Amino acid sequence: MHTLIRTEVLKLRTVRSPWLLLAASPLLVIAGVSGLVVSSKKTLDTAAQSSALAHVGLTSILTLVFGILAVAGEYRHKTITDTYLSTPARGRVIGAKLLVHAVFAAASGVLSSLVGLGIAAAWWADKGVSFTWTDSQMWATIGGGIAWNAAFAAIGVGVGALIRSLVGAIAVALAWVALVEGIVGQLIGNLARWLPFNAGQALGAGAKAMTTGDLLPRWGGGAVLAVYTLVFAALAVTTSMRRDVS
């Protein structure tokens, strides 16, 4: 397993697109925090700190695509055959991809958090407001956002294994987040809070809801997202073991 993990890390080091995705995460946080401060007409307080740092969780959309690239990207570039020939135990290959991409996504969340904290503190200072570093709600939001990034990367690996077309997998994933959950939210109300993106928002509490209806409590969102992560991880392993490469 250690060899497989090192191999996955080596693949990430030699491919440009995953790094471009992860590099965009801090930029998204900078834009989100700055936009919130500029557009806000209220006094900046601890609640605003939590809302600003909730943008860390929203970068999970990028780590979702990052996870999809792990499997669907190999099918696109025809390298998946060599991967499975060198390691016939496909379950272990997918397991390594799940672990490595989740860890890298979490690391990306940490980096985005540090950038977000720096930008938020700078904005607060510019407005003449003291930034409260000991605010527990803000740190809970940051922790939830990092976990959301890791979970969506693992879910992305599952999506890439189920829909082996890279373009198709990304299109389905983004359409689900942007359209399906919003439409379902309007149709079924509070039941939509059990869907994966809404569960992620609950975990990274403080994010401005992109769908209608109430969110689960933070612990509930974390539990639901963990279940989705395990389900997609299991689907990724079983699908890869049973289906032909071609």
Image (spheres, rainbow, N blue to C red):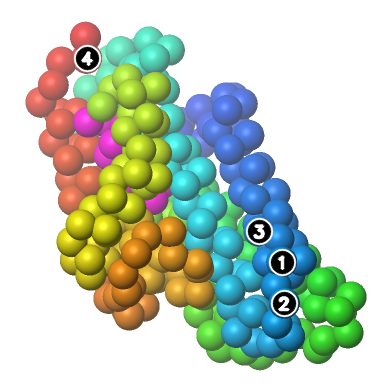
Amino acid under label 1? Ser
Residue at 33 percent of width and 24 percent of height: 168
Question: What secondary structure prevails in the magenta region?
Answer: helix
Q: Which residue is mark 3?
A: 32
Q: Which residue is mark 2?
A: 41
Taking 47 as reference, is 84 left or right?
left
Where is residue 121 shown, x and y percent of the image?
79, 75
**Quadrant the C terminus occupies:** top left
Q: Which residue is mark 1?
A: 39
Circle nearer the viewer, 3 or 2: 2
Taking 18 as reference, is 117 left or right?
right
Residue at 38 percent of width and 10 percent of height: 78
Can you say whether 124 is above or below 209 in the image?
below
Is 153 one of the magenta-colored residues?
Answer: yes
Q: Residues within 10 Å of mark 4 (few under 14, many from 20)?
A: few
At numbered mark 3, what does the secondary structure look like: helix, strand or loop?
helix
Q: Are marks 2 and 1 in contact (CB under 8 Å)?
A: yes
Circle nearer the viewer, 1 or 3: 1
Segment colored magenta: 152-162
Quarter of the view holding residue 178: top left
Q: CA distance from mark 1 to mark 3?
A: 10 Å
Viewer-nearest residue: 15 or 229: 229
At numbered mark 1, what does the secondary structure look like: helix, strand or loop?
helix
Circle nearer the viewer, 3 or 4: 3
Q: Are marks 1 and 4 in contact (CB under 8 Å)?
A: no
Q: Which residue is mark 4?
A: 245
In terms of sequence position, does the residue under pointer 3 or pointer 4 come before the other?
Answer: 3
Can you say whether 245 is above or below 206 in the image?
above
Residue at 50 percent of width and 79 percent of height: 140
In terms of sequence position, does the residue under pointer 4 or pointer 2 come before the other?
Answer: 2
Q: Residues within 10 Å of mark 2 (few under 14, many from 20)?
A: few
